[in-house]
Image: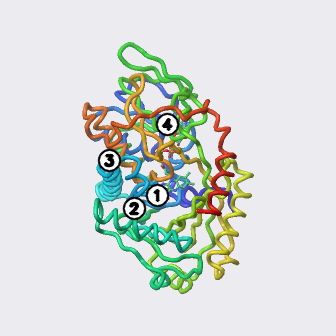
Amino acid sequence: MKLDSYWLDTAPPLVSACEGPVEGQADVVVIGGGFTGLSAAQALGKRGASVTVLDAGRIGGGASGRNGGQVNTGVAQDFVALVAQLGVERASACYRAFSDAVDTVERLIREENIDCNYSATGKLKLASKPHHLAHLEKTAELIRREVDTDIELIGRERIRSEIQSDSFYGGLLQRHGGQMHMGKFTVGLADAAVRRGAKLYENAAVTAIAKDGAGFKVTTARGEVRAKQVLIATGPSRHGPFGWYRRRLAPVGSFIVVTEPLAPELLAQVFPNRRAYTTTRLMHNYFRVTPDSRLLFGGRARFTASERPSDAKSGRILQQGLAAMFPMLANARIDYCWGGLVDMTADRLPHAGQHDGIYFSLGYSGHGTQMSTHMGQVMADVMDGHEERNPWRESEWPAIPGHTGKPWFLPLVGTYYRIKDIFY
Ligand SMILES: Cc1cc2nc3c(=O)[nH]c(=O)nc-3n(C[C@H](O)[C@H](O)[C@H](O)COP(=O)(O)OP(=O)(O)OC[C@H]3O[C@@H](n4cnc5c(N)ncnc54)[C@H](O)[C@@H]3O)c2cc1C
Protein backbone atom coordinates (compact mmCIF):
# COMPACT_ATOMS: atom_id res chain seq x y z
CA MET A 1 0.00 0.00 0.00
CA LYS A 2 1.34 3.42 -0.95
CA LEU A 3 0.99 6.19 1.62
CA ASP A 4 0.58 8.66 -1.24
CA SER A 5 -2.23 10.40 -3.09
CA TYR A 6 -3.52 8.30 -5.98
CA TRP A 7 -4.12 11.54 -7.94
CA LEU A 8 -0.53 12.73 -7.55
CA ASP A 9 0.92 9.26 -8.16
CA THR A 10 -0.98 8.78 -11.44
CA ALA A 11 -0.70 12.35 -12.82
CA PRO A 12 1.69 13.22 -15.64
CA PRO A 13 4.85 14.96 -14.39
CA LEU A 14 4.81 18.75 -14.22
CA VAL A 15 7.71 19.91 -16.38
CA SER A 16 6.82 23.60 -16.58
CA ALA A 17 8.08 24.73 -13.12
CA CYS A 18 11.10 27.09 -13.00
CA GLU A 19 14.59 26.08 -11.94
CA GLY A 20 16.97 28.54 -10.24
CA PRO A 21 16.40 31.26 -7.67
CA VAL A 22 13.21 33.23 -7.02
CA GLU A 23 14.10 36.80 -7.99
CA GLY A 24 13.06 39.94 -9.85
CA GLN A 25 9.74 41.75 -10.11
CA ALA A 26 6.23 40.61 -11.01
CA ASP A 27 2.89 42.37 -11.27
CA VAL A 28 1.40 39.71 -8.98
CA VAL A 29 2.90 37.15 -6.62
CA VAL A 30 0.53 34.28 -5.87
CA ILE A 31 1.38 32.31 -2.72
CA GLY A 32 0.18 28.72 -3.05
CA GLY A 33 0.11 26.54 -6.17
CA GLY A 34 -3.21 24.72 -5.66
CA PHE A 35 -6.35 25.33 -7.73
CA THR A 36 -6.89 28.85 -6.30
CA GLY A 37 -3.36 29.97 -7.13
CA LEU A 38 -3.06 28.23 -10.52
CA SER A 39 -6.47 29.41 -11.68
CA ALA A 40 -5.64 32.99 -10.61
CA ALA A 41 -2.31 32.77 -12.44
CA GLN A 42 -4.05 31.56 -15.61
CA ALA A 43 -6.64 34.37 -15.49
CA LEU A 44 -4.15 37.11 -14.56
CA GLY A 45 -1.74 35.95 -17.27
CA LYS A 46 -4.56 35.97 -19.80
CA ARG A 47 -5.09 39.67 -19.15
CA GLY A 48 -1.39 40.44 -19.58
CA ALA A 49 -0.11 40.53 -15.98
CA SER A 50 3.28 39.02 -15.12
CA VAL A 51 2.68 36.42 -12.40
CA THR A 52 4.97 34.42 -10.09
CA VAL A 53 3.43 31.45 -8.24
CA LEU A 54 5.30 30.27 -5.15
CA ASP A 55 4.60 26.94 -3.50
CA ALA A 56 6.19 25.56 -0.34
CA GLY A 57 6.24 22.05 -1.79
CA ARG A 58 4.97 20.41 -4.96
CA ILE A 59 2.52 22.31 -7.19
CA GLY A 60 -0.85 20.70 -6.41
CA GLY A 61 0.62 18.89 -3.40
CA GLY A 62 -1.90 20.44 -0.97
CA ALA A 63 -5.63 19.72 -0.84
CA SER A 64 -5.92 20.16 -4.63
CA GLY A 65 -3.96 16.98 -5.24
CA ARG A 66 -5.25 15.06 -2.23
CA ASN A 67 -9.06 15.33 -2.33
CA GLY A 68 -12.02 13.07 -3.03
CA GLY A 69 -12.19 13.91 -6.73
CA GLN A 70 -15.72 15.34 -6.62
CA VAL A 71 -16.79 18.59 -8.33
CA ASN A 72 -20.19 19.16 -6.78
CA THR A 73 -22.82 21.80 -6.94
CA GLY A 74 -24.61 22.95 -3.77
CA VAL A 75 -23.23 24.39 -0.54
CA ALA A 76 -20.99 22.50 1.92
CA GLN A 77 -23.58 22.57 4.67
CA ASP A 78 -27.25 21.65 4.86
CA PHE A 79 -29.25 24.11 2.72
CA VAL A 80 -32.17 24.23 5.22
CA ALA A 81 -29.73 25.23 7.98
CA LEU A 82 -28.06 27.80 5.73
CA VAL A 83 -31.43 29.41 4.95
CA ALA A 84 -32.17 29.54 8.70
CA GLN A 85 -28.78 31.16 9.28
CA LEU A 86 -28.58 33.65 6.39
CA GLY A 87 -32.09 34.01 4.99
CA VAL A 88 -33.31 32.57 1.73
CA GLU A 89 -31.88 35.23 -0.56
CA ARG A 90 -28.30 35.06 0.71
CA ALA A 91 -28.35 31.24 1.04
CA SER A 92 -29.59 30.95 -2.55
CA ALA A 93 -26.81 33.28 -3.71
CA CYS A 94 -24.28 31.00 -1.98
CA TYR A 95 -25.80 27.96 -3.70
CA ARG A 96 -25.68 29.71 -7.07
CA ALA A 97 -22.03 30.62 -6.52
CA PHE A 98 -21.24 26.89 -6.31
CA SER A 99 -23.19 26.22 -9.54
CA ASP A 100 -21.17 28.99 -11.20
CA ALA A 101 -18.02 27.36 -9.83
CA VAL A 102 -18.88 24.02 -11.49
CA ASP A 103 -19.43 25.94 -14.75
CA THR A 104 -16.01 27.56 -14.35
CA VAL A 105 -14.28 24.18 -14.00
CA GLU A 106 -16.09 22.85 -17.08
CA ARG A 107 -15.24 26.03 -19.05
CA LEU A 108 -11.54 25.91 -18.14
CA ILE A 109 -11.30 22.23 -19.10
CA ARG A 110 -12.80 23.10 -22.48
CA GLU A 111 -10.88 26.33 -23.09
CA GLU A 112 -7.50 25.00 -22.01
CA ASN A 113 -8.02 21.51 -23.44
CA ILE A 114 -7.32 19.80 -20.13
CA ASP A 115 -7.43 16.01 -20.31
CA CYS A 116 -8.64 15.09 -16.79
CA ASN A 117 -11.42 12.48 -17.22
CA TYR A 118 -14.15 14.98 -16.30
CA SER A 119 -17.48 13.21 -16.10
CA ALA A 120 -20.78 15.04 -15.37
CA THR A 121 -22.25 12.37 -13.11
CA GLY A 122 -23.92 14.59 -10.52
CA LYS A 123 -23.76 13.96 -6.77
CA LEU A 124 -25.93 11.53 -4.80
CA LYS A 125 -26.21 12.37 -1.10
CA LEU A 126 -27.19 9.14 0.66
CA ALA A 127 -29.44 9.03 3.74
CA SER A 128 -27.70 6.96 6.42
CA LYS A 129 -30.79 6.82 8.67
CA PRO A 130 -34.53 6.78 7.89
CA HIS A 131 -35.11 10.23 9.41
CA HIS A 132 -32.21 11.63 7.36
CA LEU A 133 -34.28 10.85 4.27
CA ALA A 134 -37.17 12.87 5.69
CA HIS A 135 -34.76 15.77 6.11
CA LEU A 136 -33.39 15.34 2.58
CA GLU A 137 -36.98 15.52 1.34
CA LYS A 138 -37.44 18.88 3.09
CA THR A 139 -34.09 20.07 1.73
CA ALA A 140 -35.01 18.97 -1.81
CA GLU A 141 -38.31 20.85 -1.64
CA LEU A 142 -36.59 24.05 -0.53
CA ILE A 143 -33.76 23.78 -3.09
CA ARG A 144 -36.20 23.06 -5.92
CA ARG A 145 -38.45 25.96 -4.95
CA GLU A 146 -35.70 28.54 -4.44
CA VAL A 147 -32.66 27.80 -6.51
CA ASP A 148 -32.19 24.54 -8.47
CA THR A 149 -34.75 22.39 -10.28
CA ASP A 150 -32.20 19.92 -11.62
CA ILE A 151 -32.44 17.66 -8.57
CA GLU A 152 -34.30 14.49 -7.68
CA LEU A 153 -35.25 12.77 -4.45
CA ILE A 154 -34.71 9.03 -4.62
CA GLY A 155 -36.87 7.12 -2.15
CA ARG A 156 -36.10 3.89 -0.34
CA GLU A 157 -37.88 1.80 -3.00
CA ARG A 158 -35.55 3.07 -5.77
CA ILE A 159 -32.25 3.51 -3.98
CA ARG A 160 -31.05 0.02 -4.98
CA SER A 161 -31.14 1.08 -8.61
CA GLU A 162 -28.49 3.65 -7.66
CA ILE A 163 -26.34 1.74 -5.17
CA GLN A 164 -26.08 -1.85 -3.91
CA SER A 165 -25.80 -1.41 -0.16
CA ASP A 166 -28.00 -2.03 2.88
CA SER A 167 -26.66 1.16 4.51
CA PHE A 168 -28.93 3.68 2.78
CA TYR A 169 -32.58 4.69 2.96
CA GLY A 170 -32.73 6.96 -0.08
CA GLY A 171 -30.87 9.93 -1.43
CA LEU A 172 -30.85 13.38 -2.98
CA LEU A 173 -29.44 13.59 -6.50
CA GLN A 174 -28.04 16.96 -7.63
CA ARG A 175 -27.31 16.54 -11.32
CA HIS A 176 -25.08 19.57 -11.94
CA GLY A 177 -21.41 18.76 -11.42
CA GLY A 178 -19.40 15.59 -11.46
CA GLN A 179 -15.90 14.27 -10.93
CA MET A 180 -12.43 14.42 -12.46
CA HIS A 181 -8.84 13.26 -12.08
CA MET A 182 -7.42 15.90 -9.75
CA GLY A 183 -3.76 15.27 -10.58
CA LYS A 184 -4.34 15.61 -14.32
CA PHE A 185 -6.43 18.76 -13.78
CA THR A 186 -3.63 20.27 -11.65
CA VAL A 187 -0.98 19.68 -14.29
CA GLY A 188 -3.31 20.89 -17.07
CA LEU A 189 -4.13 24.07 -15.17
CA ALA A 190 -0.47 24.66 -14.26
CA ASP A 191 0.58 24.25 -17.91
CA ALA A 192 -2.22 26.64 -18.95
CA ALA A 193 -0.95 29.25 -16.47
CA VAL A 194 2.60 28.85 -17.84
CA ARG A 195 1.31 29.22 -21.42
CA ARG A 196 -0.19 32.54 -20.24
CA GLY A 197 3.26 33.61 -19.04
CA ALA A 198 3.19 32.65 -15.34
CA LYS A 199 6.35 31.44 -13.59
CA LEU A 200 5.84 28.55 -11.14
CA TYR A 201 8.28 27.79 -8.32
CA GLU A 202 8.13 24.62 -6.21
CA ASN A 203 9.89 24.20 -2.83
CA ALA A 204 9.73 27.99 -2.36
CA ALA A 205 8.06 28.37 1.04
CA VAL A 206 7.21 32.01 1.77
CA THR A 207 8.75 33.07 5.06
CA ALA A 208 8.05 36.84 5.06
CA ILE A 209 6.02 39.52 3.29
CA ALA A 210 7.05 43.17 3.76
CA LYS A 211 5.73 46.45 2.35
CA ASP A 212 8.08 47.75 -0.33
CA GLY A 213 7.18 51.20 -1.64
CA ALA A 214 3.75 50.91 -3.25
CA GLY A 215 4.09 47.10 -3.44
CA PHE A 216 5.53 44.15 -1.51
CA LYS A 217 8.73 42.16 -1.07
CA VAL A 218 8.10 38.44 -0.68
CA THR A 219 10.87 36.33 0.84
CA THR A 220 11.06 32.60 0.14
CA ALA A 221 13.36 29.66 0.78
CA ARG A 222 14.68 30.21 -2.79
CA GLY A 223 15.11 33.98 -2.85
CA GLU A 224 13.11 37.22 -2.96
CA VAL A 225 10.64 38.66 -5.44
CA ARG A 226 8.95 42.07 -5.56
CA ALA A 227 5.35 42.56 -6.64
CA LYS A 228 2.67 45.22 -7.02
CA GLN A 229 0.00 42.84 -5.68
CA VAL A 230 0.01 39.64 -3.60
CA LEU A 231 -2.64 36.91 -3.47
CA ILE A 232 -2.66 34.42 -0.58
CA ALA A 233 -3.92 31.05 -1.80
CA THR A 234 -2.26 28.81 0.77
CA GLY A 235 -5.19 26.81 2.14
CA PRO A 236 -4.70 26.06 5.87
CA SER A 237 -0.95 26.80 5.85
CA ARG A 238 0.81 25.77 9.03
CA HIS A 239 3.93 27.82 8.33
CA GLY A 240 4.82 31.28 7.01
CA PRO A 241 3.58 34.76 7.93
CA PHE A 242 -0.13 33.91 7.95
CA GLY A 243 -1.09 34.14 11.65
CA TRP A 244 -4.15 36.34 10.95
CA TYR A 245 -5.55 33.67 8.61
CA ARG A 246 -4.54 30.76 10.87
CA ARG A 247 -6.77 32.13 13.65
CA ARG A 248 -9.73 32.01 11.25
CA LEU A 249 -9.20 28.52 9.82
CA ALA A 250 -9.37 25.11 11.52
CA PRO A 251 -7.10 22.63 9.65
CA VAL A 252 -9.19 19.45 9.85
CA GLY A 253 -7.72 16.17 8.58
CA SER A 254 -9.64 14.14 6.01
CA PHE A 255 -8.46 10.72 4.83
CA ILE A 256 -8.84 8.52 1.78
CA VAL A 257 -8.20 4.92 0.72
CA VAL A 258 -8.22 3.62 -2.86
CA THR A 259 -8.68 -0.05 -3.71
CA GLU A 260 -7.07 -2.13 -6.39
CA PRO A 261 -8.86 -1.98 -9.81
CA LEU A 262 -12.19 -3.82 -9.49
CA ALA A 263 -13.99 -6.06 -11.96
CA PRO A 264 -16.23 -4.04 -14.35
CA GLU A 265 -19.24 -6.36 -13.69
CA LEU A 266 -18.92 -5.83 -9.94
CA LEU A 267 -18.72 -2.05 -10.34
CA ALA A 268 -21.68 -2.01 -12.72
CA GLN A 269 -23.68 -3.89 -10.10
CA VAL A 270 -22.70 -1.76 -7.07
CA PHE A 271 -22.35 1.70 -8.64
CA PRO A 272 -24.36 1.50 -11.91
CA ASN A 273 -24.27 5.26 -12.53
CA ARG A 274 -20.77 5.94 -11.13
CA ARG A 275 -21.89 9.13 -9.40
CA ALA A 276 -20.06 11.22 -6.81
CA TYR A 277 -21.45 9.93 -3.48
CA THR A 278 -21.57 11.39 0.03
CA THR A 279 -23.43 10.26 3.14
CA THR A 280 -25.50 12.25 5.63
CA ARG A 281 -23.70 11.31 8.87
CA LEU A 282 -21.84 14.12 10.65
CA MET A 283 -18.66 11.99 10.38
CA HIS A 284 -19.67 11.33 6.79
CA ASN A 285 -18.04 9.35 4.00
CA TYR A 286 -17.53 10.30 0.37
CA PHE A 287 -16.69 7.92 -2.45
CA ARG A 288 -16.53 7.43 -6.23
CA VAL A 289 -15.01 5.14 -8.82
CA THR A 290 -11.72 6.26 -10.39
CA PRO A 291 -11.14 6.35 -14.18
CA ASP A 292 -9.22 3.05 -13.89
CA SER A 293 -12.04 1.32 -11.96
CA ARG A 294 -10.85 1.55 -8.36
CA LEU A 295 -13.09 2.60 -5.48
CA LEU A 296 -11.92 5.79 -3.77
CA PHE A 297 -13.42 5.95 -0.26
CA GLY A 298 -12.85 8.89 2.09
CA GLY A 299 -13.98 10.35 5.35
CA ARG A 300 -12.93 12.19 8.43
CA ALA A 301 -12.10 8.90 10.24
CA ARG A 302 -10.30 10.72 13.08
CA PHE A 303 -10.12 14.41 14.10
CA THR A 304 -6.41 14.70 13.70
CA ALA A 305 -3.92 16.32 11.34
CA SER A 306 -2.72 14.29 8.40
CA GLU A 307 0.79 12.87 9.02
CA ARG A 308 2.15 10.00 6.92
CA PRO A 309 2.45 7.21 9.56
CA SER A 310 -0.84 8.05 11.29
CA ASP A 311 -2.69 8.24 7.94
CA ALA A 312 -2.40 4.43 7.84
CA LYS A 313 -4.35 4.28 11.13
CA SER A 314 -7.12 6.42 9.57
CA GLY A 315 -6.94 4.18 6.49
CA ARG A 316 -7.72 1.07 8.59
CA ILE A 317 -10.81 2.80 10.05
CA LEU A 318 -11.93 3.70 6.52
CA GLN A 319 -11.34 0.15 5.27
CA GLN A 320 -13.66 -1.15 8.01
CA GLY A 321 -16.29 1.46 7.04
CA LEU A 322 -15.99 0.48 3.37
CA ALA A 323 -16.41 -3.23 4.20
CA ALA A 324 -19.47 -2.56 6.36
CA MET A 325 -21.11 -0.48 3.60
CA PHE A 326 -20.13 -2.77 0.72
CA PRO A 327 -19.55 -6.33 2.04
CA MET A 328 -18.90 -7.56 -1.53
CA LEU A 329 -15.80 -5.30 -1.61
CA ALA A 330 -14.52 -6.26 1.86
CA ASN A 331 -11.59 -8.24 0.46
CA ALA A 332 -10.50 -5.66 -2.10
CA ARG A 333 -6.83 -4.83 -1.63
CA ILE A 334 -6.08 -1.23 -0.58
CA ASP A 335 -3.44 0.24 -2.91
CA TYR A 336 -3.35 3.86 -1.69
CA CYS A 337 -3.97 5.64 1.60
CA TRP A 338 -3.38 9.31 2.34
CA GLY A 339 -4.72 12.33 4.17
CA GLY A 340 -5.02 16.05 3.66
CA LEU A 341 -6.06 19.18 5.49
CA VAL A 342 -9.41 20.86 4.98
CA ASP A 343 -9.43 24.63 5.61
CA MET A 344 -12.61 24.72 7.69
CA THR A 345 -14.19 28.07 8.64
CA ALA A 346 -16.68 28.65 11.48
CA ASP A 347 -19.54 29.31 9.02
CA ARG A 348 -18.34 26.64 6.53
CA LEU A 349 -18.32 29.29 3.79
CA PRO A 350 -15.30 30.53 1.81
CA HIS A 351 -13.80 33.90 2.65
CA ALA A 352 -12.09 36.16 0.11
CA GLY A 353 -11.10 39.79 -0.12
CA GLN A 354 -8.28 41.98 1.11
CA HIS A 355 -6.47 42.30 4.47
CA ASP A 356 -3.64 44.82 5.03
CA GLY A 357 -3.49 45.45 1.29
CA ILE A 358 -2.97 41.75 0.50
CA TYR A 359 -5.62 39.71 -1.34
CA PHE A 360 -6.74 36.27 -0.13
CA SER A 361 -9.17 33.48 -0.99
CA LEU A 362 -9.41 30.65 1.53
CA GLY A 363 -11.71 28.56 3.70
CA TYR A 364 -13.50 26.31 1.23
CA SER A 365 -14.34 23.95 4.10
CA GLY A 366 -13.91 20.66 2.22
CA HIS A 367 -16.11 21.76 -0.65
CA GLY A 368 -13.59 23.54 -2.78
CA THR A 369 -12.38 21.79 -5.92
CA GLN A 370 -14.88 23.85 -7.92
CA MET A 371 -14.90 26.96 -5.69
CA SER A 372 -11.10 27.29 -5.45
CA THR A 373 -10.83 27.09 -9.26
CA HIS A 374 -13.66 29.61 -9.59
CA MET A 375 -12.22 31.98 -6.98
CA GLY A 376 -8.87 32.04 -8.77
CA GLN A 377 -10.68 33.50 -11.77
CA VAL A 378 -12.79 35.80 -9.58
CA MET A 379 -9.77 37.12 -7.66
CA ALA A 380 -8.10 38.06 -10.96
CA ASP A 381 -11.15 40.29 -11.57
CA VAL A 382 -11.14 41.62 -8.00
CA MET A 383 -7.44 42.50 -8.21
CA ASP A 384 -8.25 44.35 -11.41
CA GLY A 385 -10.76 46.56 -9.56
CA HIS A 386 -13.95 44.48 -9.86
CA GLU A 387 -14.72 43.87 -6.20
CA GLU A 388 -18.39 43.37 -7.07
CA ARG A 389 -17.58 40.01 -8.75
CA ASN A 390 -16.57 38.44 -5.40
CA PRO A 391 -19.57 36.41 -4.14
CA TRP A 392 -18.12 36.38 -0.59
CA ARG A 393 -17.37 40.14 -0.32
CA GLU A 394 -20.07 40.86 2.24
CA SER A 395 -19.24 38.18 4.83
CA GLU A 396 -17.53 39.13 8.06
CA TRP A 397 -14.61 36.91 9.03
CA PRO A 398 -13.91 37.09 12.75
CA ALA A 399 -11.24 34.88 14.37
CA ILE A 400 -12.51 31.55 15.75
CA PRO A 401 -13.00 32.23 19.51
CA GLY A 402 -10.10 30.80 21.55
CA HIS A 403 -8.08 29.95 18.39
CA THR A 404 -4.53 31.16 18.80
CA GLY A 405 -3.31 29.61 15.54
CA LYS A 406 -2.77 26.07 16.88
CA PRO A 407 -5.95 23.95 16.59
CA TRP A 408 -5.85 22.54 20.16
CA PHE A 409 -9.63 22.11 20.13
CA LEU A 410 -9.89 19.58 17.26
CA PRO A 411 -9.87 16.36 19.39
CA LEU A 412 -12.68 17.86 21.52
CA VAL A 413 -14.69 18.71 18.39
CA GLY A 414 -14.09 15.15 17.12
CA THR A 415 -15.46 13.60 20.32
CA TYR A 416 -18.44 15.95 20.19
CA TYR A 417 -19.25 14.95 16.57
CA ARG A 418 -18.87 11.23 17.29
CA ILE A 419 -21.31 11.43 20.22
CA LYS A 420 -23.69 13.68 18.27
CA ASP A 421 -23.66 11.22 15.33
CA ILE A 422 -25.10 8.50 17.59
CA PHE A 423 -28.20 10.59 18.27
CA TYR A 424 -28.35 12.49 14.96
C1 LIG B 1 -8.86 14.79 1.88
C2 LIG B 1 -9.62 15.89 1.21
C3 LIG B 1 -10.73 15.59 0.44
C4 LIG B 1 -11.44 16.62 -0.23
N1 LIG B 1 -12.43 16.27 -1.09
C5 LIG B 1 -13.06 17.23 -1.82
C6 LIG B 1 -13.99 16.87 -2.82
O1 LIG B 1 -14.21 15.70 -3.15
N2 LIG B 1 -14.67 17.89 -3.44
C7 LIG B 1 -14.42 19.19 -3.14
O2 LIG B 1 -15.08 20.08 -3.71
N3 LIG B 1 -13.46 19.55 -2.27
C8 LIG B 1 -12.75 18.61 -1.62
N4 LIG B 1 -11.75 18.96 -0.77
C9 LIG B 1 -11.36 20.39 -0.68
C10 LIG B 1 -10.58 20.90 -1.89
O3 LIG B 1 -9.60 19.94 -2.27
C11 LIG B 1 -9.92 22.24 -1.53
O4 LIG B 1 -10.93 23.12 -1.10
C12 LIG B 1 -9.18 22.90 -2.69
O5 LIG B 1 -8.33 21.99 -3.35
C13 LIG B 1 -8.39 24.08 -2.13
O6 LIG B 1 -7.47 24.56 -3.11
P1 LIG B 1 -6.45 25.70 -2.71
O7 LIG B 1 -5.69 26.02 -3.93
O8 LIG B 1 -7.16 26.82 -2.04
O9 LIG B 1 -5.51 25.05 -1.59
P2 LIG B 1 -4.39 23.91 -1.70
O10 LIG B 1 -4.64 22.98 -2.79
O11 LIG B 1 -4.25 23.35 -0.32
O12 LIG B 1 -3.09 24.70 -2.07
C14 LIG B 1 -2.43 25.54 -1.17
C15 LIG B 1 -0.94 25.49 -1.48
O13 LIG B 1 -0.31 26.51 -0.69
C16 LIG B 1 0.98 26.04 -0.38
N5 LIG B 1 1.52 26.78 0.78
C17 LIG B 1 1.12 26.70 2.07
N6 LIG B 1 1.90 27.50 2.84
C18 LIG B 1 2.80 28.09 2.01
C19 LIG B 1 3.88 29.01 2.20
N7 LIG B 1 4.22 29.48 3.41
N8 LIG B 1 4.58 29.38 1.11
C20 LIG B 1 4.27 28.91 -0.13
N9 LIG B 1 3.27 28.04 -0.35
C21 LIG B 1 2.55 27.64 0.71
C22 LIG B 1 0.79 24.56 -0.11
O14 LIG B 1 2.00 23.85 -0.28
C23 LIG B 1 -0.28 24.18 -1.12
O15 LIG B 1 0.24 23.57 -2.30
C24 LIG B 1 -11.03 17.98 -0.07
C25 LIG B 1 -9.93 18.29 0.74
C26 LIG B 1 -9.22 17.26 1.36
C27 LIG B 1 -8.01 17.62 2.18
The residue that appears at 30% across and 59% down in the rendered structure is 110
User: Badge 2: few (under 14), some or many (20 or more) residues near its Cα, within 10 Å?
Assistant: some
Q: Amino acid at mark 1?
A: Lys
Residue to which mark 1 is pinned:
184
Image x and y of residue 303, in percent: 66, 50
Residue to which mark 3 is pinned:
90
Labels 1 & 4 near each other (Cβ < 8 A): no
How much space separates mark 1 and mark 4, taking CA atoms?
Answer: 19 Å
How much space separates mark 1 and mark 3, taking CA atoms?
Answer: 34 Å
Which mark is on residue 115? 2
The image quadrant where one finds the C terminus is bottom right
First along the sequence among labels 3 and 4: 3
Of residue 243 and residue 412, the one placed in the foreground of this image is: 412
Image x and y of residue 216, in percent: 42, 20
First along the sequence among labels 3 and 2: 3
Residue to which mark 4 is pinned:
201
Secondary structure under tag 4 reads strand
The residue that appears at 64% across and 71% down in the rendered structure is 322
First along the sequence among labels 2 and 4: 2
First along the sequence among labels 1 and 4: 1
Of residue 260 and residue 398, the one placed in the foreground of this image is: 398
Instruction: Find the residue positioned furthest to the top.
Output: 213
The image quadrant where one finds the N terminus is bottom right
Of residue 62 and residue 302, the one placed in the foreground of this image is: 302
Position above or below: 33 against 178: above
